[in-house]
Image: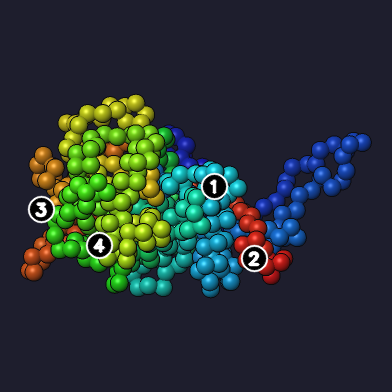
Amino acid sequence: MLETAVARGRSVACLAPGPATQWFVTSSPPPMNANTTSASASIELPSVGTVGADGMLCLAATVMRGGTSKGIFLLQSSLPPAARADPALRDRLLLRLIGSPDPYGAQIDGLGGGTSSTSKVVLVARSARPGHDVDYLFGAVAIGQPLIDWSGNCGNLSAAVGPFAIAQGLVPAPRDGLATVRLWQANIGKTIVAHVPMQGGAVCEAGDFMLDGVAFASAAIELEFLDPGGGKAGAAGPLLPTGRAVDVLTAPDGARVEATLINAGNPTVFVDAQAIGLTGREMQHDVNANPALLDRLEALRAQAAVVMGLAGSAGEATRDRPATPKLCFVAPPADYRAADGRRVNAADIDLVARILSMGRLHHAMTGTGGVAIAAAASIPGTLVQRLLPAAPPDGRVRFGHPSGSLSVAARASRGDDGRWRIDKVSMTRSARRLMQGSVFVPWAEVRGTPGGA
């Protein structure tokens, strides 16, 4: 339940651990008159995990903001056994829950928000893996296609996994101070450590930390992405998949475009904004309202996916793997106005960066994009490193994005074989529980069987 504690003279919202909300009605029924019946005096809700007489499956769900994203969080164990056993059925269930595919692009008949930042699902379970508390899977849900891309992670929503797990009773936490939650990111096979503030036995959500791209202040959550370079066996490959700091891609018009291809946080493709006719200061409307530009950027991204060994063809990358690799274009530091009208000064940043997510320019920066930028900035010869005015002190780089700026730190080392390794990337995010309750999904429709049997 949501409790309120008092700290430093102000109210602090705290997320108390415990089971899912129990639904009940405590208010008195309205006075009876000629136009009312006794049926209006009570409300009966179906049990979580059951299918009602109307064919609707009732599932326990939580809407969480993590960083600059929102997603639907569910316990893996809360899914019907048939959906846990059949990934295709699981995906149909989650697509319907979110409201995809939607030819109108709004996801009105689901919980999605009609943008890549708000069309996301996270499945969480207690971990059986040594040294870890929680396993989680992240799904990027396409809006107009019947597709969930499980190929990568969401660094923003990673900040919400620890608070969700504590609130669900999956992880022991101290009454006060910081709870250290070790997350196993199952999509990419990596460990993330979340440091979650606690007060009075609950996750503290309110605080003074402002994250550009989020309108309100929250408590800070520190994230450590351990050994984020490369991917699990058979997936994304080494830190630099080609072994080179810079490769060359061919644009649709035949132009040769330098690119840094890196596996860090998520597989990411960096190109110089000037090389593709951009400034690096573009805002969402400048890119997302330009179909020809989006097609050109997607062609480069899809080609890079093939070079990185992530897809057999460019068509396959566009069709089946829209979430990764991400494409990010970068440029030297420059003055510009953020989306909220604030001025971002060139003197306060090391470079500017814009990243695409699910085929559209992100309104801020993906969390894994921050990981990739910090990693690339630490490796000599990459496009990101070449743009920096000076070597980042302590591995920390600060870059401008459409909603403001972000600071991320990387610790890199070089092995005896001459290969670079990213030991850790650190960043500060925030998270908050927005809603906890029940979501209803037409189970018969999802299963394609009469009555949902």
1 or 2: mark nearer the eye: 1
50 above or below 350? Answer: below
Q: Are marks 2 and 4 in contact (CB under 8 Å)?
A: no
**Of the pair 70 and 98, the residue shown nearer to us:** 98
Question: Horizontally, is 129 left or right of 406 in the view?
Answer: right
Residue 57, above or below 109: below
Reading the chain from its start, which is encountered first: label 1 or label 2? 1
Circles 1 and 2: CB atoms closer than 8 Å: no
Residue 380 visible somewhere in the drawing: yes
User: In the image, what residue type sits under mark 4?
Assistant: Met
Question: What is the quadrant of residue 333 in the picture?
Answer: top left
Residue at x 47%, y 66% (from the top left corner): 125
Q: Which residue is mark 4?
A: 308
- Residue 154: x and y, percent? 37, 54
Give the residue at the far right of this rendering: 34
Rounded to the nearest angstrom, the CA distance separating label 2 from label 4 is 38 Å
